[in-house]
Image (spheres, rainbow, N blue to C red):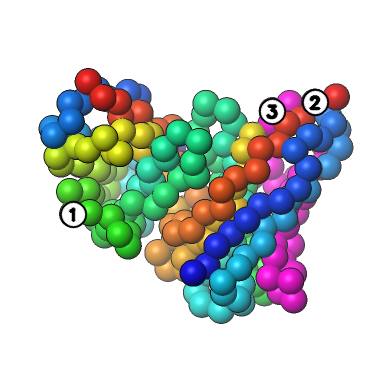
């Protein structure tokens, strides 16, 4: 079955760029009516949707981070990636990648999450 | 659109029914989804289209509502049901997804 797995550094310095990759296994990122998302959760807090990409590369972002975020897709590697620039302590969180379903607009599969701490 | 969940914490005895509420700041033209998050785990899809259970979710989970008021009811609570529950909605213009702040369901 399809699985998602986040990878990337667990520690990022303030003002630098947070970079994470989500690898999709068990199915092609280009198949089916899906879009691919990043969602984060600060410790003890709720969920915040960061943005999404389609396999075509078309993206949409949360206005709260839009000026600092890019999401790209690499169909040859079955991966999509998150870059968040100029990070601060407020960006410390568990970052999840998740599969979204077109039309139903929900997230049916999630990665296990990657904890990222912003600290010098 | 802001999604407000209540109560923040709900204490219920095993075997009883829990009723969780999610209120939208304006009437929704779309359906909502519900997720369950156990400690140390990623969220798991429970319900979509407001009232359709996700694959493998037992029938004791019931979703309902429309407009601004939505409810997740869990009958015959079992130990594995004690977790945090989030509602989620989707805006169409511009595309945006928002979650409620969560309801923690704890054992009474």
Task: Give the residue number, with chain letter if any, for mark 3.
Answer: A90
Q: Is residue B74 above or below residue B12?
A: below
Q: Earlier in the sequence, mark 3 or mark 2?
A: 3
Tell me which chain the residue with mark 3 is part of. A
Task: Between residue A112 and residue A51, name the one nearer to us.
Answer: A112
* Image disc number at residue A35: none
Name the residue: 60% across, 76% down.
Answer: A28
- C-alpha separation, residue under disc 1 versus residue under disc 2: 45 Å
* Image disc number at residue A119: 2
Task: Between residue A72 and residue B80, name the one nearer to us.
Answer: B80
Q: Which residues are magenta?
A: A63-92
Task: Between residue A58 and residue B53, name the one nearer to us.
Answer: B53
Expressed as whole percent of the image width and height from the top left, the position of residue A48 reads 55, 40
Q: Secondary structure at mark 3?
A: helix
Extreme residue toward the front, this view: B79
Residue A18 found in image quarter: top right
Expressed as whole percent of the image width and height from the top left, the position of residue B71 reads 24, 42
Name the residue: 76% across, 48% down.
Answer: A8
- C-alpha separation, residue under disc 1 versus residue under disc 3: 39 Å
């Amino acid at each position: 079955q399809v699985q998602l797995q986040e990878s990337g550094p667990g520690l990022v310095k303030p003002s630098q760029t947070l970079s994470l990759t989500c690898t999709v296994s068990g199915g092609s990122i280009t198949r089916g009516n899906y879009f691919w998302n990043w969602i984060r959760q600060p410790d003890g807090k709720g969920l915040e949707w960061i943005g999404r990409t389609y396999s075509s590369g078309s993206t949409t972002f949360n206005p709260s981070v839009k000026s600092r975020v890019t999401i790209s897709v690499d169909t040859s590697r079955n991966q999509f990636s998150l870059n968040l620039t100029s990070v601060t302590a407020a960006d410390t969180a568990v970052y999840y990648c998740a599969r979204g379903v077109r039309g139903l607009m929900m997230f049916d599969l999630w990665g296990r999450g990657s904890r990222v701490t912003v600290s010098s | 659109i802001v999604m407000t969940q209540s109560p923040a914490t709900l204490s219920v005895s095993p075997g009883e029914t829990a009723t969780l509420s999610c209120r939208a700041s304006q009437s929704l033209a779309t359906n909502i989804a519900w997720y369950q998050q156990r400690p140390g785990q990623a969220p798991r899809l429970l319900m979509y289209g407001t009232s359709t259970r996700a694959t493998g979710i037992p029938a004791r989970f019931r979703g309902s509502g429309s407009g601004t008021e939505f409810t997740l009811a869990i009958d015959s609570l079992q130990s594995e049901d004690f977790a945090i529950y989030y509602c989620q909605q989707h805006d169409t213009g511009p595309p945006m997804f928002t979650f409620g702040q969560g309801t923690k369901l704890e054992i009474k």
